Image (cartoon, coloured by chain):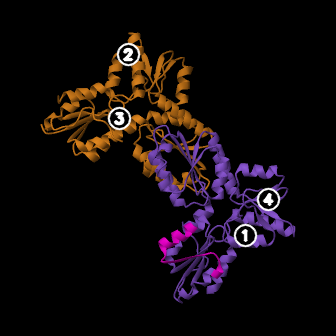
Chain colours: A orange, B purple
Amino acid sequence: MTVPFNGSISRTQRVSLCVYSGFCTGVERAVRLAEGYLRERPGQELYVTGDIVHNAGVMRRLTSIGLKRIEGDAPPVGKTVLVQAHGISPSVEEVLVKNHNRIINGTCPILKANFDRFRLAEEQGFRSFLFGDRAHPEVEAIQGLLRDVVVFRDLEELSGLRNRVLTTDKIALIAQSTKPVDEYRRSAKMLVEQLKPQQLFQMHFSICAATILREEEIKEKAPLFSTVFIVGGKHSANTKKLVLLAREQCPRVHWVEDVEEARGYLALIQKSDTILIGGGASTPLQDIKAIEALFL
Amino acid sequence: MTVPFNGSISRTQRVSLCVYSGFCTGVERAVRLAEGYLRERPGQELYVTGDIVHNAGVMRRLTSIGLKRIEGDAPPVGKTVLVQAHGISPSVEEVLVKNHNRIINGTCPILKANFDRFRLAEEQGFRSFLFGDRAHPEVEAIQGLLRDVVVFRDLEELSGLRNRVLTTDKIALIAQSTKPVDEYRRSAKMLVEQLKPQQLFQMHFSICAATILREEEIKEKAPLFSTVFIVGGKHSANTKKLVLLAREQCPRVHWVEDVEEARGYLALIQKSDTILIGGGASTPLQDIKAIEALFL
């Protein structure tokens, strides 16, 4: 894949933003739902089932206009509750409904489609092997959705599941939508190596396009720049992967949460440096533009 | 996998038979059906839809007691017809039934199960990519069974199908049951590399255990012998693959159809040679034992 530059690279241009920057459509939608609700009803509260997205700045801004994060096990009663972009498990939703809350579903539509397909696979007798991080809300939602799901976080853990693979007639490989695509493909290949006659293997390519395109752009462009800034929350899995990919390609990569943190690196930048700025699916475009402005 | 030797290898033992030798259960069954029918009804004819199995010796023997191969496009009328182990397409079967023939189904039960699963995948909206040889009766049977199937014979041909892969939402990879297992796994990996978000990939591990076990045994044992004889029909795909695998591991490999052909190589054998004898799924055990007897 060749990713277009926004602007051409020359000796005089030192700064380039990644084309695939800013919120993905799922995050955009969830944030807009929250913002729209709160702006139209000043003074009202809106509860959310967790981080709408893994970005501290976004959460701070929404909290300042009335968003409340549900903490611990005590669900609100008779409130309006926004389901976070990562989705929630049916049992959590059930408790919210029982407590007379009004639900606004902020689940990313791509995740929603994935969840439906995973459930169909289970109905068809497939046992799911989920490539994901156990503590991630998307994974918790999927675990709540399926009766039987085996979670693994990396290839090493998958290789330890050999016995379960061998004793499962119908295997469905599924993934948290923001896991690294290269590792997901390697997981599939590892399973293909283990298959026996009459086994049925199914791979849901459930990693979202936003994740893949950002990764491919970083892989392609990072070697062309002397410095890369990756902007995004330190809890964001897809942002972290961008940092790791950039570090394979470029000697100087800074992972920053916001413009203030980026400012700390200004002293390291030379006039001759060329700078690439990118971010995860939960990083607002204005955070990236604010960092660009430091160099313009 | 470690394959047990039948007998131990020592300096004094020069000849070893492959453990996985002789007819696979599917071939065994089809031959027994033909033989049983003809022996119980001396003088009667039995028609067969093609080679019961790809072995000239077996076909000659059965022909001598009354088996008739249906040639060309003219179906018999009012006869008893045995379906060959590779199966036939529903349209061919329909013509036979319309012509008042009595059908004995000699289709290998493993193929039958595969065919049912392929059809289910199609009903569920999957488009099948079939790893197989276009002229092979098993492939013809599958092509007759499915409305839409894309056949490829090797990895090179599959790589040329990139556009069709990219435009298919639900891909089912299926295989002729006797194709080489390593290439089949490589085909799956090639497809996994091409997947895009939301695509669904399914792999039916439809290569039969008899094929896989024979291949693994040859890979494991061929390097331990100075000469390998592979016994089987020159039209047999799985026999050919055994020959190729053996040649990767052992400098002297002879592909022979029968004991007469093997006799031609006797002059090349030294007292110090060690000899391994194996064969494809359609090679009778007595053919292999007859060659062993040359050296005992």
Q: Give the range drawn in magenta.
A: B240-260
* Tag shown at residue B59: 1
- Residue at 69% from the left image edge and 65% from the top image edge: B53
The x, y position of residue A192, in whole percent, is 51, 53
* Tag shown at residue A235: 3
- Between the residue at mark 4 and the residue at mark 1, the CA separation in whole angstroms equals 15 Å
Q: What element carries label 4?
A: strand
Is residue B194 something that shows in the picture?
yes
Q: Vertical placement of B170 versus B94: above or below? A: above
- Between the residue at mark 3 and the residue at mark 2, the CA separation in whole angstroms equals 23 Å
- Residue at 40% from the left image edge and 20% from the top image edge: A32
Q: Vertical placement of B200 versus B238: above or below? A: above
- Between the residue at mark 2 and the residue at mark 4, the CA separation in whole angstroms equals 79 Å
Q: Do labels 2 and 4 share a chain?
A: no
The x, y position of residue B31, in whole percent, is 75, 66
- Along the viewing direction, whichever of A199 and A10 lies nearer the viewer: A10
Of the two numbered discs 1 and 2 in the rendering, the one whose residue sits closer to the viewer = 1
Quarter in which the C terminus of chain B is drawn:
bottom right
> Are circles 1 and 2 on residues that touch, CB within 8 Å?
no
Residue of label 2: A66
Q: Are marks 3 and 1 on the same chain?
A: no
- Between the residue at mark 1 and the residue at mark 2, the CA separation in whole angstroms equals 83 Å
